[in-house]
Amino acid sequence: MATRHLFAGLAWARGLLPLVLLLALWQLVFARSSIHFPPPLAWWDSLVAMQKSGLLGEATLATLGSVLSGFLLASACGLAGGLLIGVSRTARRILGPLLEFFRALPPPVIVPVLILWLGYAESLKLLVVVSAAIWPVLLNVSAAITRTEPLLLDVAKSFRLSRAKTIWKIQIPASLPEFFLGMRVALPLAVVVTLLVEILTSLPGIGSLMTQAQRNYQSAQLFGLLVVVGLLGFIISAAFTLIEKGVVGRWQPRH
């Protein structure tokens, strides 16, 4: 068993080999400082300098906080809205056209409107992230609820379960895989939209640091921040995968 885990770890490490070779080649070809193609070691030096000044830590926490808060709020609202639309035909008829209209709006389009209402505040980032990340969750949950196995609903009727208990004991567990699938789609959207809003509005975060680096022609800092963004997205995605396996595994049927 230990040997199997060791080989699995080595296989994962081999997947990073092309990236390592590319960075080594980049370092050799562009060993001297360049405005457009700074060597990877210069990226590291710029990140160390930003970390010592406190800018990198503050920006990373600001971006991470906006991503997680927007993602969790979007997931909760998407679950509630999906349940409402899924169980109520009246709600689907009334809210359907309105939801389709808002779903068609690209997130950057609503940024100027929200700036008029809220100004350059953290709530601006939160609302834009929620407006982008809510749709995969809401649509997946509503579709899963409407496709609930009729036999399960017949079982609920035979046990004379109330509407609320039917939703809680049958329909929500049945829609759980689709709910997590929607969350998996919404998570990278939350990361992208958070960075986009920071770039457009210069609100605190990694996106605003990237904008400042681009304006000041600090290309090494810009490339270093790109690496930080990639690592941040990788860590968030890996953590979500572990949570998903733990939660969904508890609902799997046992024979």
Image (spheres, rainbow, N blue to C red):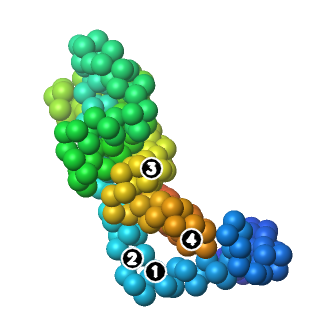
Q: In this view, does 103 lie above or below 38?
A: above
Chain-order first, disc 4 or disc 2: 2
Q: In this view, does 255 lie above or below 86?
A: below
Residue located beneath label 4 in the image: 218
Whether the residues at callouts 2 and 1 have beta carbons within 8 Å, the answer is yes
Element class at badge 4: loop
**Residue flagged by tag 3: what amino acid is it?**
Leu
Residue 102 in sight here = yes
Residue located beneath label 1 in the image: 50
Residue located beneath label 3 in the image: 196
Whether the residues at callouts 4 and 2 have beta carbons within 8 Å, the answer is no
Of marks 4 and 2, the one in the foreground = 4
**Residue flagged by tag 2: what amino acid is it?**
Leu
**Residue flagged by tag 1: what amino acid is it?**
Met
Element class at badge 1: helix
Residue 198: x and y in percent read 39, 55
Residue 73 as seen in the image, left or right of residue 63: left
Q: Distance between the residues labelled 2 and 3?
A: 19 Å
Label placed on residue 55: 2
